[in-house]
Image: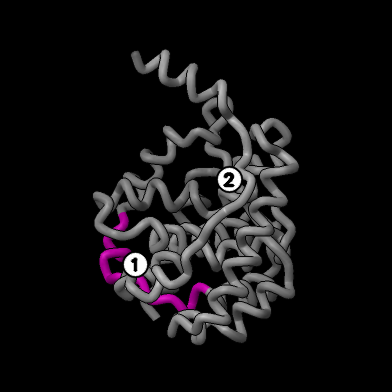
């Protein structure tokens, strides 16, 4: 039965003709849910371009206060950027689409380790910060660029439970990540805003280092 449903769905795989987003719905969200959405927003600020990064840096408080015009501008940018990436690599065959997973190898494992007691977007923020520290540790990201990029996630409050992350359990959870290859953990890392490096293997000690630095970062 499930195979048949999968076959039927695959027969109709196509991109949508339009995306409908009701921004009024955002005003009904509790702060925790809205804060979760900011995780993905920050991701796009890092993987798209410097103009959008600067826009978010200048307007993050207006977005957090749900200013309608500013929120709309941010959503339009994110949707257009994602559409552009997906259109270049619709079926994930070229590797281009992998940049959308920036921070998510850490995030999914963190969610699992914490028993899904934090929202996905909150885990994404923690994952992005971990990926930034890993990028720096491996040598892709300069100290100056690391400091600059951390200014955005520093504006997001994460629940205290983030400090209960167990590095070993997070590492073990990463073993099942779909991006792994030849039994190596593979990461999407960054060197500059808008410049990503995909399929980067990382050593266990460097992953632990990145997680430890992330936990200290959110203690401040």
Closer to the camera in the image, 108 or 94: 94
Q: Is residue 84 left or right of residue 9?
A: right
Q: CA distance from mark 1 to mark 2?
A: 27 Å
**Residue at left 58%, top 29%?**
13
Q: Is residue 43 left or right of residue 3?
A: right
| Above/below status of 19 relative to 43 | above
Q: Which mark is residue 187?
A: 2
Query: Callout 1 environment at 10 Å: few (<14), some (14 to 19), or many (20+)?
Result: some
Is residue 141 a member of the stretch shown in magenta?
Answer: no
Q: Secondary structure at mark 2?
A: strand
Closer to the camera in the image, 1 or 106: 1
**Residue at left 48%, top 77%?**
154
Q: Of tags 1 and 2, which is closer to the observer?
A: 1
Q: Secondary structure at mark 1?
A: helix
| Above/below status of 89 relative to 116 | above
Decide which of tag 1 and tag 2 comes sooner along the chain: 1
Magenta residues? 153-165
Would you identify the image quadrant in which residue 4 lies?
Answer: top left
For mark 1, what is the residue? 33
User: Residue 211 at x, y = what percent?
Assistant: 43, 58
Q: Is residue 200 visible?
A: no
Q: Is residue 128 left or right of residue 145?
A: left
Q: Is residue 204 left or right of residue 97?
A: left
Our reading of the magenta stretch's main secondary structure is: helix
């Amino acid at each position: 039965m499930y195979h048949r449903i999968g076959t039927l769905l695959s027969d109709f795989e196509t991109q949508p003709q339009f995306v409908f987003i009701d921004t009024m719905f955002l005003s009904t969200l509790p702060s925790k849910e809205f804060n979760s959405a900011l995780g993905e927003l920050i991701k796009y600020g890092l993987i798209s371009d410097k103009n959008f990064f600067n826009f978010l840096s200048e307007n993050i408080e207006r977005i957090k206060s749900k200013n309608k015009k500013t929120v709309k501008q941010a959503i339009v940018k994110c949707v257009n950027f994602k559409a552009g990436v997906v259109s270049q690599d619709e079926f994930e065959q070229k590797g281009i689409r992998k940049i959308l997973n920036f921070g998510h190898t850490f995030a999914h494992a963190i969610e699992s380790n914490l028993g899904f007691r934090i929202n996905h977007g909150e885990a994404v923020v923690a994952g992005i910060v971990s990926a930034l520290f890993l990028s720096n540790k491996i040598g892709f990201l300069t100290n100056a660029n690391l400091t600059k990029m951390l200014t955005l996630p520093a504006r997001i409050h994460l629940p205290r439970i983030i400090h209960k992350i167990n590095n070993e359990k997070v590492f073990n959870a990463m073993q099942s990540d779909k991006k792994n290859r030849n039994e190596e953990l593979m990461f999407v890392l960054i060197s500059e805003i808008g410049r990503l490096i995909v399929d980067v293997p990382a050593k266990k000690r460097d992953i632990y280092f990145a997680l430890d630095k992330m936990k200290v970062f959110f203690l401040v």
